[in-house]
Image (cartoon, rainbow, N blue to C red):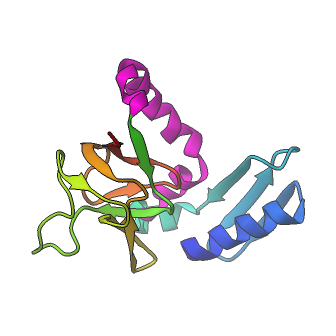
Amino acid sequence: MELKQIQNLIKFVAKSGASEVKLEMEDFKITIKTGSDGEKTTLVQQVPAEAMAQMPMPAMPQPQVSQPQGAVGNQAPQEQAAPEEDKYVTVKSPIIGTFYRKPSPDKPVFCEVGDIIKEGDVLCVIEAMKLFNEIESEVSGKIVKVLVDDSSPVEFDQPLFLVDPA
């Protein structure tokens, strides 16, 4: 099952109001549980040992996708350590995928720290399911900090850039 199919399944379960759905196929099992208030969705994927031995890397991102609370928890110390960052606008990832600062390996980065950007400027691309999605700025200002390393996996709503709108 591909990531896009899993995402669509999660959305469908959340909208349906079901509290738990289990899907078992030949090579994996997926259990989707929603909280009683419908706000929290959890994805648990169990993969047989032989599949884990063959593909250890794809099995790792799945728990990260299903637990954005961990990603938010990792960002909290940075936010607490720098209260002056409150005046900055945070550009967040609208999708799950792989973050790239360049349009291709032989091209320059879209933006650097200190660059002045305007609304609609492309800041990065995020690859999801072999599609490269350009992420455009929704604010004008100056890039203060790049919060994600190039070629890193990113989650939905994960902070990518800090922009000083002044």
Q: Position of residue 76 (x, y in %)?
A: 47, 28
Say if the magenta span includes residue 74: yes
**In the foreground, 40 or 119:** 119
Q: Position of residue 6 (x, y in %)?
A: 64, 70
Q: Is residue 60 visible?
A: no
Question: Image check: 40 left or right of 5?
Answer: right
**In the foreground, 123 or 95:** 123
Say if the magenta span includes residue 55: no
- For the point 78% across and 69% down, the residue is 12
Q: Is residue 24 above or below residue 46?
A: below
Region in magenta: 58-87
Outermost residue, bottom direction?
130
**In the foreground, 33 or 40:** 40
- For the point 47% across and 57% down, the residue is 61
Q: Position of residue 17 (x, y in %)?
A: 90, 59
Q: Quadrant of the C terminus?
A: top left
Question: Image check: 143 left or right of 26?
Answer: left
Q: Position of residue 3 (x, y in %)?
A: 55, 71
- For the point 21% across and 52% down, the residue is 116
Q: Quadrant of the N terminus?
A: bottom right
